[in-house]
Amino acid sequence: MDGFPILSLMLLVPLVGAIACFFVSAPTARVIALAATLVDLAFGIVLWGAFDVGGAQWQFTERAELFAGFSWALGIDGIALLLILLTVFLMPICIGASWNSIQKRVGEYMAAFLIMETLMIGVFAAQDLFLFYIMFEAGLIPMYLIIGIWGGDNRIYAAYKFFLYTLIGSVLMLIAMFWMVREAGTTDIPTLMAYDFPAGAQTWLWLAFFASFAVKMPMWPVHTWLPDAHVQAPTAGSVILAGVLLKMGGYGFIRFAIPMFPEASVQFAWLVFALSMIAVVVTSLIALVQHDMKKLIAYSSVAHMAIVTAALFAFNVQGFEGAMMVMLGHGLVSGALFLCVGVIYDRLHTREISRYGGLAINMPKYAIFFLLFTMASIGLPGTSNFIGEFLGLAGIYQASSWVALVCTTGIILGAGYMLYLYRRVAFGDQKNADAAAMPDMDGREWMMMVPLAAATLWMGIYPESFLAPMRGDIEWLDQRLESVAPAGDAHLAMPSAEQQAAAAAAAEEHHDAGEGAH
C-alpha cells in the first residue's frame, strides 16, 4: 500500500459522484450515490485490513506542498481510522434510508450527502491545520442545505440555528490557529501535537478550541441547536448528524485541545466535569418528558456525549479508550434509532409517541430490531455501548469518584426514558387503527437494519478489534499528559510483587487450615 494515495481516492470518489448527481435523472442519481458510497466502504475495509497495528503512528501519509506553507497533507492513526470506518459504514445506509422518502430535487440531495462524506473523511484524515479547518467548517454547508431544503415544517429556523451556533464557535478557533502557526512555524498537525506552547498562551488557545468543539459535541448549555436540527432533518440527515458530525467535537478534543495544550486541559478539567455532570442529569430528565421520538433520542445523544467529554478529561488510558468506544458505539446505535423512527415515520408521517402503540403485534420484526437498539442505547452487556460506558466510567472513577457517581445516574435515567419510549411505541393497546394497519419491514429496511445490528453486537462481543488499532495512539496521549495529569481521588494501585506473594501465602495457609478442620 506504500505510495498508493488511498485517502485522496476516498475523497475523490464521492466528490466525482456528487458532481455526476447534478446532471442526471432522479433514479440514476440514487444509483450513483449508492455506488459511490459502496466503493468508499470497500476502500475503508481495505484501509482497515492494510493498517499496521503496532506499526508507525501515522500511516498512509500523503503530502503535496501547495502555497504559503499550506499543504495537501493526509494521513491517519488508529483513532482517525475508526472514525473514517464509521463514516463509510453509515453513508450507504443513509442513501438507502432516503431511497423512497426523498422525491423532490433528488440529484441535489444525493450530491449534498456525497459532498458531506468527502468533507467528513477529510476532517479525520487531514494532517495540515488549515486543511482540517476548511474540511471541518465546510461540512456545515451540505448539512445546512439538507435540513433547510428537505427538512420538516420549521426547517429554516433549525438550519439557521445549527449554522450560526457552530460557525460562531469556530471563528475563535481560526484566530487561535493563526497564532499557533506563527509561534510553532508549521501547520503540520503531528508536529503541533508534540509542540510545547507557553503555559500562559495555552489557556487562551484551549478556550478558543473549546468554544468550537463544545458546540460541535454539543455540550450543555450550547446544545439547544441539536434537538431542533434532529427534529427537522430528514431521517438520513439525523443518522449522519448523530452518527458522525457529533464525533468531530470529540475528535477535536483528542487531536487538538488535549495533546497540544496539556497544561490548560488539566487547568480546565473541572469546567468540563461540571458541564458534563449537568448535561448527563438535565438532558436525561428532559428526555423523559418528550412527546416527539426524535427529540427524545436527540437529548439522549447530548447525555451520551457528556460521558465522552468527562471520560476524555479523566486523563487516563481507560478514559480515552472509553470515550472512543462510546463515540463509535453511539454513532451506530443512535443512527440506528433514528432509522427506526424513520421506518414508522415513512408509514404514518408523524413522530408523536402517542400516535403509536402495540406495534409489536403488526410489526414484530421491526419491534425486535427496535428493542435491540434500545437495549444497546442503555448499555446492555454484549452491545457496543456497554464496553464504552464501562471503560469510560472506570476512567472517570480513577479521576473523581463524585463525577463518576453523577455520570452513572445518566445510565439509570437512560434506561428510564428509553424503556419508557419502547413501551409506549411497541407494547400496550393499539389505540389508532392507522398505526395498527402498518405493514412490517420491507427488504430495503432489512438491508439497512441488519448491518447496524451486526456491528452493534460485534462491538459488544469482540471489542478488541476496535481497541487494538487505537491502543498505541492512546498510550502516546497518556504519556503526553503524564507529567501534568492530576492524581485522582480513587487511589487505585496495583499491589507490589511482594504484597501479591504474601497474599497468596496467606490464602494458602487459610485453605490448608480449613482442610485440616474438616
Image: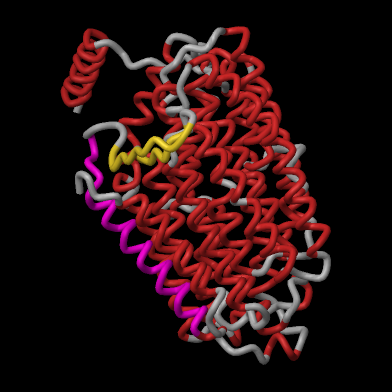
Indicate whether 5 appears above or below 356.
above
Along the line of sight, the residue nearer the viewer: 71 or 487: 71
Indicate whether 92 appears above or below 326.
below
Query: Looking at the image, what colour scheme do you see?
Result: secondary structure
Expressed as whole percent of the image width and height from the top left, the position of residue 53 reads 24, 39
Expressed as whole percent of the image width and height from the top left, the position of residue 60 reads 29, 43
Expressed as whole percent of the image width and height from the top left, the position of residue 484 reads 49, 10
- What secondary structure prevails in the magenta region? helix
Q: Image point 39% across, 60% down: which residue?
A: 455
Indicate whether 45 appears above or below 278.
below
| Residue 282 falls left or right of residue 242 | right
Q: Image point 59% across, 83% down: which residue?
A: 100
Along the line of sight, the residue nearer the viewer: 131 or 499: 131
Q: Is residue 40 magenta?
A: yes
Q: Image point 47% across, 62% down: which residue?
A: 15
| Residue 171 falls left or right of residue 480 | right
Q: Quadrant of residue 410?
A: top right
Give the residues in magenta: 28-54
Q: Is residue 17 magenta?
A: no
Q: How many marks?
A: 0
Q: Image point 49% across, 73% down: which residue?
A: 20
Indicate whether 449 appears above or below 173.
below
Expressed as whole percent of the image width and height from the top left, the position of residue 154 reads 83, 65
**Quarter of the rendering occupied by the C terminus:** top left
